[in-house]
Image (tube, rainbow, N blue to C red):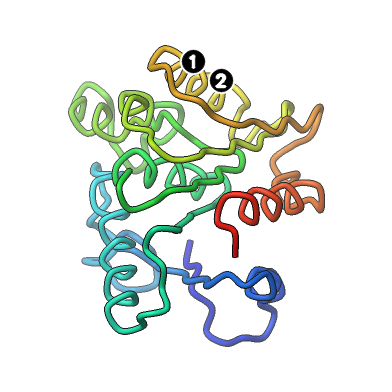
């Protein structure tokens, strides 16, 4: 879905992060709808290949134009499929992103994303590349997972799979469980307070 706001109206969460002393930028990377078919088709059967690269390109442009941007303290966060990309950024560009917060993340796109990816039989390479699980060993930064145990949109098993991959790779992570909570719990006050604490602790604004 399109995330970049067209105005500052209703941007209460963004303003809250700015009030902490954080710089916040939002990017609609290639694959986002409402920008035309060619822009969106970049991710067809090709999820996870270009989106983080677009975010990195924007970040570097911002840093080049604004010397107060501290590239040694960069975080990313998101929920649901945005949680997938929060994890993806840490794993795909571990020297760019130091902190990631993934709320109810998808981590294995083979679990119900055939509309975008086609069948595994015809696009196995695409599925393999898109999986965050195979890249768990790349983790260098701090990762916080937040997940409701009764989530039916992004089942808790998605985080369990990632935790298993991280532990097999010997990589530390942090976890906030929301017992018997569903997908909407990622936007609860408890979840947002956890996000705030993590950003303040590790970015030190």
Q: Residue at x 37, y 47 (%)?
A: 89
Residue toward you, 148 or 115 = 148
Image coords of residue 17 (percent x, y): 65, 68
- Using the numbered discs, state the Cα–Cα distance from disc 1 to disc 2 in whole angstroms: 6 Å
Q: Which residue is mark 2?
A: 160
Left or right: 53, with 166 as reference point: left
Residue toward you, 125 or 77 = 77
Residue toward you, 115 or 13 = 13
Q: Which residue is mark 1?
A: 164
Q: Quadrant of residue 46?
A: top left
Whether the residues at callouts 1 and 2 have beta carbons within 8 Å, the answer is yes
Crowding at dot 2, Cα within 10 Å, few <14 / some 14-19 / many 20+, comes out as few
Left or right: 190, with 49 as reference point: right
Would you place residue 79 above or below residue 176 in this image? below
Mark carried by residue 50: none
Would you place residue 71 above or below residue 118 in this image? below
Left or right: 93, with 73 as reference point: left
Q: Residue at x 33, y 62 (%)?
A: 55
Crowding at dot 1, Cα within 10 Å, few <14 / some 14-19 / many 20+, comes out as few
Image coords of residue 90 (percent x, y): 39, 43
Q: Tag 2, which secondary structure?
A: helix
Q: Residue furthest top?
A: 168
Image coords of residue 99 (percent x, y): 49, 48
Q: Residue at x 48, y 55 (%)?
A: 75
Q: Quadrant of residue 180?
A: top right
């Amino acid at each position: 879905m399109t995330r970049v706001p067209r105005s500052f109206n209703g941007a209460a969460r963004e303003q809250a992060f700015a009030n902490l002393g954080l710089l916040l930028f939002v990017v609609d990377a290639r694959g986002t709808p409402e920008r035309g078919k060619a822009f969106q088709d970049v991710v067809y059967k090709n999820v996870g290949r270009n989106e983080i690269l677009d975010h990195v390109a924007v970040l570097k442009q911002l840093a080049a134009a604004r010397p107060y941007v501290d590239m040694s303290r960069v975080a990313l966060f998101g929920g649901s499929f945005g949680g997938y990309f929060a994890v993806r950024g840490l794993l795909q560009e571990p020297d760019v992103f130091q902190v990631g917060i993934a709320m109810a993340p998808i981590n294995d796109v083979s679990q119900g994303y055939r509309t975008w990816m086609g069948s595994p039989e015809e696009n196995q390479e695409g599925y393999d590349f898109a999986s965050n699980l195979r890249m768990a060993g790349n983790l260098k930064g701090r990762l916080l997972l937040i997940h409701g145990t009764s989530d039916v949109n992004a089942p808790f098993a998605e985080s369990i799979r990632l935790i298993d991959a991280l532990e097999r790779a010997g990589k530390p992570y942090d976890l906030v469980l929301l017992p018997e909570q569903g997908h909407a719990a990622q936007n609860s006050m408890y979840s947002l307070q956890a996000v705030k604490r993590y950003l303040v602790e590790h970015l030190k604004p």
